Image: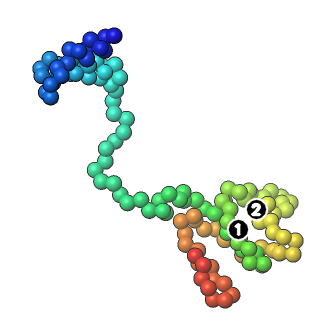
């Protein structure tokens, strides 16, 4: 009901007039006191271009290549330290007739070029 009274008090012509501007100013100041707080975000001058590589978290990974040609990438954290009598890393499991031929550590931001036996490059 109070809102309708204030609405009727505003002039209906194209300009608000002093009385209308005063009412709006008072309303905005009341909202500022009730809900206003310090800015939570920072405004920066320039925005840099975002590359696909920026979205990839950098971490060390273990890349294994089996004798049969299968390639697997796992985070280093998947490999645990072996204690005495360890039986191997579970992440390096392969088929019965296959075995791990190459194993190396790389970063998720490194480039890996793979060449096939038909001289094709993947990567």
Vertical order, 112 against 47 (above or below): below
Front one among 27 and 49: 27
Q: Identify residue for label 1.
A: 72
Secondary structure type for disc 1: strand
Residue 40, visible in the rendered structure = yes
Percent x, y of residue 45: 28, 50
Vertical order, 62 against 117 (above or below): above
Percent x, y of residue 48: 35, 57
Q: Give the left or right position of residue 66, taking residue 122 as reference.
A: right
Question: Going 20% across and 18% down the picture, which residue do you hit?
Answer: 10
Q: Give the left or right position of residue 59, taking residue 29 as reference.
A: right
- Tell me the crowding category of disc 2: few under 14, some 14 to 19, or many 20 or more residues within 10 angstroms, Cα based: some
Percent x, y of residue 60: 60, 62
Front one among 106 and 9: 9
Front one among 88 and 116: 116
Q: Are marks 2 and 1 in contact (CB under 8 Å)?
A: yes
Q: Identify residue for label 2.
A: 91
């Amino acid at each position: 009901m109070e809102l309708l009274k204030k609405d009727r008090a505003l002039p209906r012509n194209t300009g608000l007039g002093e009385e209308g501007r005063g009412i709006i100013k008072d309303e905005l100041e009341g909202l500022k006191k009730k809900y206003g707080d310090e800015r939570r975000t920072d405004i920066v001058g320039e925005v840099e271009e975002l590359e696909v590589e920026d979205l990839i978290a950098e971490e060390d990974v273990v890349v294994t290549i089996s004798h049969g040609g299968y390639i697997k990438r796992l985070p280093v954290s998947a490999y645990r330290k072996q204690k005495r009598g360890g039986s191997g890393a579970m992440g390096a499991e392969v088929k019965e007739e296959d075995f791990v031929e190459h194993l190396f550590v790389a970063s998720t931001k490194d480039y890996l070029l793979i060449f096939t036996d038909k001289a094709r490059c993947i990567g």
